Amino acid sequence: MVVDFWGKIKKGRLSPLYLLYGTESFLLTETYELLLRTALAEEEREWNASVYDCEETPVQTALEDAETFPFFGEKRVILIKNPYFFTAEKEKEVEHDLKKLESYILSPSSFSIVIFAGPYEKLDERKKITKLIKEHAEVLVAAPLAEKELRAWIAERVKQDNVTIEENAIDTLLKLAGTNLTTLANELDKLALFVGSGGTIQQETVEMLVSRTLEQNVFVLVEKVTKRQIAEALQVFYDLLENNEEPLKILALLASQFRLLYQVKWLMSRGYGQQQIASILKVHPFRVKLAMGQAALFSEQELAAAVRQIAEADYEMKSGAMDRQLVMELLLMRWNEGMFTKAE
């Protein structure tokens, strides 16, 4: 768990070797910056922190740096980016001395912290060098956080600013801002600044300050439809138009959301759980959790009909047969009058 991994670093329990990989780039960056702050004072970083890219520089050059005693300090921090030789990617033009790397992994410098970091979903576990680094390094897989981890990360993030956050405020934050860590970090920094040191972030504060993305506004629109509040759904649509959002873009996101609801409904009816559905659809589990709640308010036939009707509206918009705003209004009014007719 990433919070536990960071906890060891914050306690000063540093390793000479780290392997950070995964698709969640925010976690990779945050972990590197935490290691840098913990290992080196700010005035030491100019002399004792180095960055190398394996797509441009041989790994042995970085290792030679790691074997050089630090200037005016006790530690060196060496970041080695894009170590593709741990993956199944083809060799590039740069010639890497992997024998030298093997030797270093087995006997790393006591005064250096070497961090291998790359945006790779998985490594090639068949390679000797990959097995070796995983055996001797502290490893963080920067994958999208599960809901429990996400909540822990949010609580830990605001704790850094001497702020607490209520559980229902976390619920609202995730609904409004989504699960992207960069977006969440920006919103949390704003909320922490607003409540001040020692303060508590409450649900009302989140609702007042957090900016809704277009995707989240469309989620709200769908939520109004699921509750048969079509007049309010129309108002959400008009608010989006006021913010210069294009009807075609709104419809495309509406289509994406209803397709998700249909897929979730279909998988639920066949006995799949939240985590399984998230894995199959490659969607964050928290988004699946919300979709399961919305999908429960429809039958499969209704969702299939909604997807078909949105496709028809999309054709009408793109063909220019009707004004785009009017197409959207008619679609919502159609749902208001007869809700969802059965798919043919």
Image (cartoon, rainbow, N blue to C red):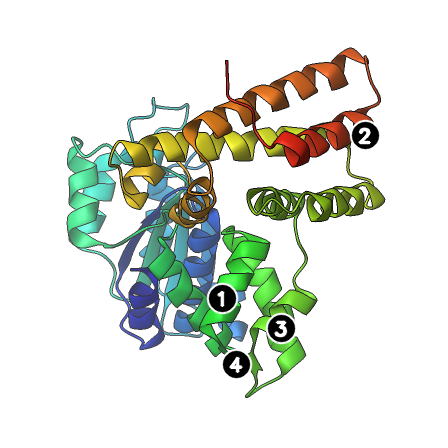
Calculate the distance from the C-alpha at mark 3 to the C-alpha at mark 4. 16 Å
> Which residue is rendered at x = 30% and y = 33% of the image?
269
Classify mark 2: helix, strand or loop: helix
User: Which x, y percent locates residue 130?
Assistant: 21, 39
Calculate the distance from the C-alpha at mark 2 to the C-alpha at mark 3. 33 Å
Q: Residues within 10 Å of mark 2 (few under 14, many from 20)?
A: some
User: Which x, y percent locates residue 341?
Assistant: 56, 24
Calculate the distance from the C-alpha at mark 4 to the C-alpha at mark 1. 13 Å
Q: For marks 3 and 4, give the one nearer the viewer.
A: 3
Q: First in sequence: mark 4 or mark 2?
A: 4
> Which residue is rendered at x = 77% and y = 11% of the image?
319
In the image shown, does 188 or 316 lie closer to the viewer? Answer: 316
> Which residue is rendered at x = 74% and y = 30% of the image?
328
CB within 8 Å, label 2 to label 1: no
Q: Is residue 148 shown left or right of residue 189?
A: left
Residue type, numbered disc 2: Gln
CB within 8 Å, label 3 to label 1: no
Q: First in sequence: mark 2 or mark 3?
A: 3
Q: For marks 2 and 3, give the one nearer the viewer.
A: 2
Classify mark 4: helix, strand or loop: loop
User: Which x, y percent locates residue 181?
Assistant: 50, 54
Q: For marks 4 and 1, give the one nearer the viewer.
A: 1
Q: Residue furthest front?
A: 338
Q: Name the residue beneath numbered marker 1.
A: 170
Q: Is residue 230 shown left or right of residue 303?
A: right
Residue type, numbered disc 3: Glu
Q: Name the residue beneath numbered marker 3.
A: 204
User: Which x, y percent locates residue 106?
Assistant: 15, 51
Above or below 51: residue 13: below
